[in-house]
Image (cartoon, rainbow, N blue to C red):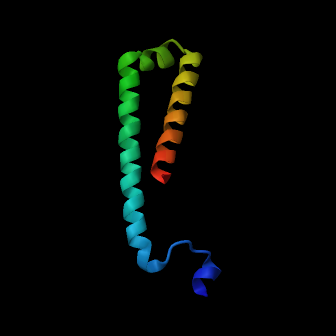
């Protein structure tokens, strides 16, 4: 009854397992995200173009790529 009152989705005895699994997936997602950003920055001079040349279009494209990658990682994690 207490669990329903608090609106908890996970039972307390399973909480540690769910937290560890979530942290593992977060770490994997961040690694993939960092590798993708590294590849993009290797292909294009992102820092120079965005910071020095004020290239807004490149910022929008890089942001769109990162959002798309985040959606793909999220869907892969959820199964």
Q: Residue at x 39, y 57 (%)?
A: 23
- Say if 64 sits above or below 78 in the image: above
- Say if 79 sits above or below 67 in the image: below
Extreme residue in the top direction? 53
Name the quadrant containing residue 38: top left
Q: Residue at x 53, y 41 (%)?
A: 71
**Between residues 78 and 10, which one lies in front from this camera angle?**
78
Instruction: Give left or right: position of 30 versus 53.
Output: left
Q: Residue at x 45, y 50 (%)?
A: 77
Percent of width and height locating residue 48: 43, 15
Percent of width and height locating residue 34: 37, 35
- Say if 29 sits above or below 67 in the image: below
Task: Report the quarter where the N terminus lies.
Answer: bottom right
Q: Residue at x 35, y 33 (%)?
A: 35
Extreme residue in the right direction? 5
Extreme residue in the bottom direction? 1
Percent of width and height locating residue 6: 61, 78
Percent of width and height locating residue 21: 38, 61
Name the quadrant containing residue 19: bottom left
- Numbered disc total: 0
**Between residues 56 and 51, which one lies in front from this camera angle?**
56
Name the quadrant containing residue 43: top left
């Amino acid at each position: 009854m207490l669990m329903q009152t608090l609106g908890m989705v996970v039972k307390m005895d399973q909480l540690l397992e769910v937290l560890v699994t979530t942290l593992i997936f977060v770490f994997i997602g961040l690694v993939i995200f960092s590798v993708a950003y590294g590849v993009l920055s290797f292909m294009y001079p992102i820092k120079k173009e965005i910071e020095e040349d004020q290239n807004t279009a490149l910022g929008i494209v890089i942001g769109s790529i990162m959002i798309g990658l985040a959606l793909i990682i999220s869907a892969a994690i959820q199964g």
